[in-house]
C-alpha cells in the first residue's frame, strides 16, 4: 500500500478530452495535504540562488543530476556561458529551435514523501493503470520517469512524440509563487491548415518516424499552467506539444513529475526531418530496406508469423474502450 494509491482511481476514471487531441487532464491530482508536502520538500522547494553556479550547487546537493533529455545539452559550462547572453549558439540542439536548456532529474530523494512518491511513479501498479489507459500491456513496455527540473532556455518545438513511445504523462509540481503565470508551461497544439498534410503523411506512412517541426507550423489550443495538474496521452500523429521556457530559474524552477512508457519491441523506422517534410514531395520517401530478419520472416508460414506477431506486439492493437487509440482525423 502507498499513501498515493488514491491516484490510481483518479487516473482510471478520468474522462478523455478530445481537444486539441485525445488526452486525459486531471486537476488537483494530489490531495492538498500531499501536494503541500511535496512542493515544500527541500528537494523540490530549492532556496533562491544568487547565480547559475549557486543554483547548480544547490541542485547537486539536493540529489539532482543532469540528464540527457530532448531540447537540452548536458555540458554545464556551455549552458552557463550561453545563459549569460542567451545569444545564438553553435550548440543549438535542433534546427526547429532557437535556444537550449538543461534538465536535471532527482536521482536519490532524501525526504520520505519524495522517496515514496518516486517508488510509486516507477511502480508496477501505477504504470499498469497508465498502460491500460493507453491501450497497451505493461509487459510490452519499459518504464522511464521521475522528478525533474527544467532550467531557463529549455525548448522543444512542436512534436507528437516518436512511434516507440506508448504513453507519456506530466504533472506540475512547481514550488515557486506565481508559477502559473510564468512562461515555462507545456503548449498543446494542432497543425495550421496549410501544414495538416504532415499529419496525413504520418498517418499513411507508418514506416516514417515522427519529428519536431517549426513553431510556425502549429497553433496553440491550450496550455497547462495549473499546478497540481496531470496530462496523460498516448502519442499519435496529432499529439503535438511543445515548451519554450523563458523565466527566472534562480527564484524557482519548472518542476514536474514526468514519465513514459516505451515499447520494448521497436520497429525499424525511416527518420524524416521537418526540412524534408517542408519540400512537400512526400511520395519520394520510401520504407526502410528489408533486413535479413525481415526476409526470413517473409518465408515463414502465415500461422507462424501470426504467432510471432501476437507474442511481440500483444496489446498494441487491442485498446480498451477508454484508451486513446479510437481516433478519426
Image: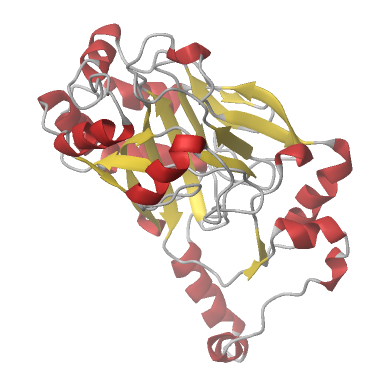
**Image-quadrant location for residue 121:** top left
Image quarter in which the C terminus is found: top right
**Along the line of sight, which residue is nearer the eye, 89 or 258?**
89
At a point 48% along the width and 49% down the height, the residue shown is 70
Query: Does the image show residue 298?
Result: yes
Could you tell me residue 99's position as x and y percent? 56, 43
Image quarter in which the N terminus is found: top left
Query: Does the image show residue 204?
Result: no
On screen, residue 309 versus residue 116, left or right, reads right
Could you tell me residue 326's position as x and y percent? 66, 41
**Image-quadrant location for residue 244:** top right
Q: Describe the colour scheme in one phrase.
A: secondary structure
Indicate whether 233 appears above or below 34: below
Indicate whether 237 appears above or below 294: above
On screen, residue 128 versus residue 101, left or right, reads left
Indicate whether 137 appears above or below 299: above
At a point 63% along the width and 33% down the height, the residue shown is 22
Indicate whether 33 appears above or below 322: above
**Image-quadrant location for residue 192:** top right
| Number of marks in the rendered image | 0
**Along the line of sight, which residue is nearer the eye, 280 or 326?**
280
Amino acid at each position: 500500500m502507498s499513501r498515493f494509491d488514491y491516484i490510481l482511481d483518479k487516473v482510471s476514471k478520468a474522462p478523455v478530452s478530445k481537444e486539441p487531441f485525445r488526452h486525459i487532464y486531471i486537476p488537483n491530482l494530489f490531495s492538498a495535504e500531499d501536494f503541500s508536502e511535496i512542493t515544500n520538500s527541500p528537494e523540490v522547494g530549492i532556496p533562491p540562488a544568487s547565480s547559475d553556479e549557486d543554483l547548480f550547487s544547490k541542485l547537486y546537493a539536493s540529489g539532482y543530476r543532469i540528464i540527457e533529455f530532448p531540447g537540452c545539452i548536458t555540458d554545464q559550462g556551455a549552458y552557463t556561458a550561453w545563459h549569460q547572453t542567451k545569444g545564438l549558439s553553435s550548440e543549438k540542439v535542433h534546427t526547429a529551435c532557437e535556444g537550449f536548456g538543461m534538465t536535471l532529474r532527482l536521482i536519490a530523494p532524501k525526504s520520505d514523501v519524495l522517496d515514496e512518491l518516486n517508488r510509486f511513479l516507477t511502480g508496477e501498479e501505477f504504470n499498469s493503470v497508465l498502460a491500460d489507459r493507453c491501450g497497451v500491456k505493461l509487459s510490452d513496455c519499459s518504464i522511464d520517469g521521475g522528478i525533474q527540473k527544467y532550467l531557463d532556455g529549455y525548448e522543444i518545438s512542436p512534436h507528437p512524440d516518436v512511434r516507440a513511445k506508448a504513453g507519456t504523462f506530466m504533472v506540475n509540481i512547481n514550488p515557486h509563487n506565481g508559477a502559473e503565470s510564468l512562461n515555462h508551461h507545456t503548449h498543446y497544439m494542432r497543425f495550421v491548415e496549410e501544414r495538416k498534410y504532415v499529419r496525413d503523411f504520418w498517418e499513411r506512412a507508418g514506416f516514417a518516424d515522427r519529428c519536431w517541426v517549426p513553431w510556425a507550423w502549429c497553433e496553440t489550443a491550450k496550455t497547462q499552467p495549473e499546478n497540481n495538474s496531470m496530462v496523460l496521452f498516448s502519442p499519435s500523429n496529432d499529439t503535438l506539444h511543445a515548451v519554450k521556457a523563458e523565466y527566472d530559474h534562480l527564484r524557482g524552477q519548472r518542476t514536474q513529475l514526468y514519465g513514459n512508457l516505451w515499447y520494448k519491441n521497436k520497429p525499424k523506422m525511416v527518420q524524416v526531418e521537418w526540412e524534408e517534410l517542408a519540400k512537400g514531395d512526400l511520395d519520394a520517401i520510401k520504407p526502410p530496406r528489408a533486413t535479413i530478419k525481415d526476409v526470413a520472416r517473409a518465408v515463414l508460414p502465415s500461422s507462424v508469423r501470426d504467432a510471432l506477431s501476437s507474442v511481440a506486439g500483444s496489446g498494441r492493437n487491442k485498446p480498451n474502450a477508454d484508451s486513446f487509440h479510437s481516433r478519426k482525423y
